[in-house]
Image: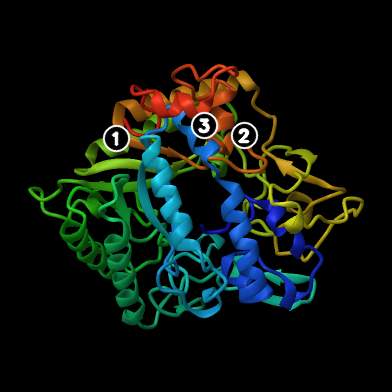
Amino acid sequence: MVLEPWITPSLFYRFLDKPQNETAMDTYTLCEALGPEEGNKLMRAHWETFYTEEHIANLSARGVEMVRLPVGDWTLDPYGPYVGCLDGAEEAIQWMFDTCAKYNISVLLDVHAVKDSQNGFDNSGRTRNVEWLNDTHFSHWPNAQANWLGEWNISAGHYDHINFENIRWSLMTSEHFLTRWGNHSAFYGFEPVNEPWWNTNEDVLKDFYRDVRRMTQALAPQAYFVFHNSFIYSPDFWNDLFRDDDIDKVAMDHHYYQAWNQGMNTTQQFCDDYEKNAATADAVKYEVWFGEWALATDVCAHWLGGFNDANTDPQFECTWNECPVSYLPKEFNVDFDRTAAMLGPYGTGNPENCAIQNGKCSDDSGFFSHEEVATIAKCALAAYDKHIQASFFWTGHNEIEAKWDYIKAWDNGWINKTEVATPSESLLTYAAQKNERSVAFLN
């Protein structure tokens, strides 16, 4: 529901080698570049094909008890270029709730994108701030801004003022989400903002969380209130959010990716690091959910740092494979020149690490063998079982990356805890009738 080019690179092929006003790198600019009519046609095709009932059945058959459903704050209250472009989003979310309920999977409804961007990343709906140097080069990471709370002053390194109108907007949209889906049988938790960045004003954010929790208790009292820790994984920082006697159905969301770690080149280092990070949860007075994690050991995932961009160089040599053929229906399948040495436009990241080259896209490095990845995965799951209450593998599926793909990671034998249906069995029948499932996401 919120586009990220690294998850669906083929959807963004159509913007390669295009000038500024025809380029898109997130949901916002896709709607700007294509307009409401063509943008909506493409988005509806995406919603209808990227996740199908078979995908949900496959997740259920592989032990999933809960999915994290990222949505934009424009879903029920569209604004700007989203108007018209994202018609049908509400119905797509309703389909996901209903289909998950059919397979006994719960849903954490996660407001992944909020007005003016809470972190500057493409996963906030809008990559902020992008400056075009010319028609073939742009800059994002050196001038990144998160303007949900106000205009971020890059030179001074602080907010000059707080935009309380945006806070009120987020409270209103939270109320609308809770009213719309809070009583659905699959509704298990609500997270009002994903990954507000580390410069977020702590007092404003904590007050926002308290307000939304009261709203959740009133409109969906059976559900968890989940708050992201703003990249501050500190018990001392967050234990004052709610009173000691008022922490029922509250969970802290922590995201942990080892791909960005530096100087780690042995499985033992990765295992020790998982244990150390999971053990920090022992001092947090709320339940701790690792709301996103993956097995990637380097930043080689194609466009992980944004469309034709990167903010970190890989430590090891990346693997390069033929770029995937689009999952979209034929009439929406726009390919690129697979004979071109390299295709722009280019961000500030080294294009040799992040641009398509001779029809090939980057994949995670092969520094660690299949068996070594399995060892790292077992360490991660053991640490999670010991210290935290839930873990969500990011993503359910994507176009390239096995180490970022729950089903591929399971089928590769890295994270599987039970057997899956044999090929001769119908996954749909298996998933619908199987009553006892292992715990894969929610411990």
Residue on which disc 2 sits: 402
Q: In the displayed structure, does residue 376 sit left or right of residue 246?
A: right
Residue on which disc 1 sits: 389
Tell me the tag on residue 58.
3
| Label 1 secondary element | loop
User: Of the residues under marks 3 and 1, which one precedes in the sequence?
Assistant: 3
Residue placed most toward the observer, 366 or 227: 227
Residue placed most toward the observer, 66 or 289: 66
Q: CA distance from mark 3 to mark 1?
A: 23 Å
Q: In the image, residue 248 lies at what x, y percent?
A: 15, 46
Residue placed most toward the observer, 431 or 127: 431
Residue placed most toward the observer, 291 or 237: 291
- Which of the two discs, 3 and 2, sits closer to the camera? 3
Mark 1 residue crowding within 10 angstroms, few (<14) / some (14–19) / many (20+): some
The disc labelled 1 sits on which kind of residue? Answer: Gln
Q: In the image, residue 429 lies at what x, y percent?
A: 47, 26
Q: Residue sitting at 36 percent across and 45 percent down? A: 107
Q: CA distance from mark 2 to mark 1?
A: 25 Å
Res. 28 image quadrant: bottom right
Q: CA distance from mark 3 to mark 2?
A: 15 Å
